[in-house]
Image (cartoon, helix red, strand yellow):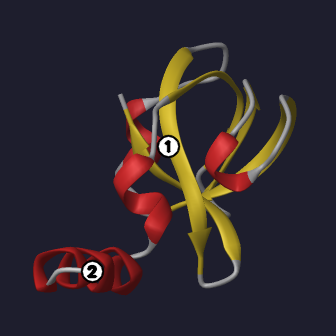
C-alpha cells in the first residue's frame, strides 16, 4: 500500500468508518420528548447500524434538533452510536 492509502485508512479509522458513508434515512416523528431529549421515530432501515425498519426511541445529539420537528412530521435523518447510545446525529 502507498503512504497516501495508509494515511487515508488511518483517518477513516480515527473518525469512525460509518461517518463517511452515512446516508440520510426517511422517517416519521411519532413523539417528541423534550424533557428526556428523545425522539420516537418510525424509520426505514438504518444500514450503517445494521438495523431493520422499525419504530424506536432515539436520543438527540443536540437539544436544538427537538425544536426542528413535531409529531407526525416526515423527516430525513442520520443516526449513529454515540457513547453507546443510538443517537440522531442530523435532521433535514
- State how far apart marks 2 and 1 are (Cα): 32 Å
Q: Is residue 67 left or right of residue 84?
A: left
Q: Nearer the viewer, residue 43 or 12?
A: 12
For the point 11% across and 77% down, which residue is it?
Answer: 4
Residue 74, horizontal then vertical, whole percent: 56, 13
Q: Circle 2 — which element?
A: loop
Residue 37, horizontal then vertical, whole percent: 59, 60
Circle on res. 78: 1
For the point 17% across and 80% down, which residue is it?
Answer: 2
Q: Circle 1 — which element?
A: strand
Q: Is residue 83 left or right of residue 40?
A: left
Q: Is residue 10 left or right of residue 19?
A: left
The quarter holding residue 30 reads top right
In the displayed structure, would residue 76 be above or below residue 81? above
The C terminus is located in which quarter?
top left
Q: Nearer the viewer, residue 48 or 1?
A: 1
Mark 1, other Cα within 10 Å: few <14 / some 14–19 / many ≥20: some
Q: Is residue 12 left or right of residue 82?
A: left
In the displayed structure, would residue 45 be above or below residue 67? above
The N terminus is located in which quarter?
bottom left
**Residue picked out by circle 2:** 1
Amino acid at each position: 500500500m502507498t503512504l497516501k492509502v495508509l494515511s487515508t485508512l488511518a483517518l477513516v479509522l480515527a473518525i469512525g468508518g460509518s461517518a463517511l458513508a452515512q446516508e440520510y434515512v426517511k422517517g416519521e416523528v411519532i413523539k417528541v420528548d423534550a424533557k428526556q431529549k428523545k425522539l420516537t421515530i418510525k424509520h426505514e432501515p438504518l444500514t450503517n447500524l445494521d438495523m431493520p425498519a422499525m419504530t424506536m426511541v432515539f436520543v438527540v445529539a443536540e437539544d436544538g434538533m427537538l425544536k426542528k420537528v413535531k409529531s407526525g412530521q416526515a423527516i430525513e435523518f442520520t443516526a449513529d452510536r454515540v457513547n453507546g447510545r443510538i443517537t440522531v446525529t442530523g435532521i433535514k
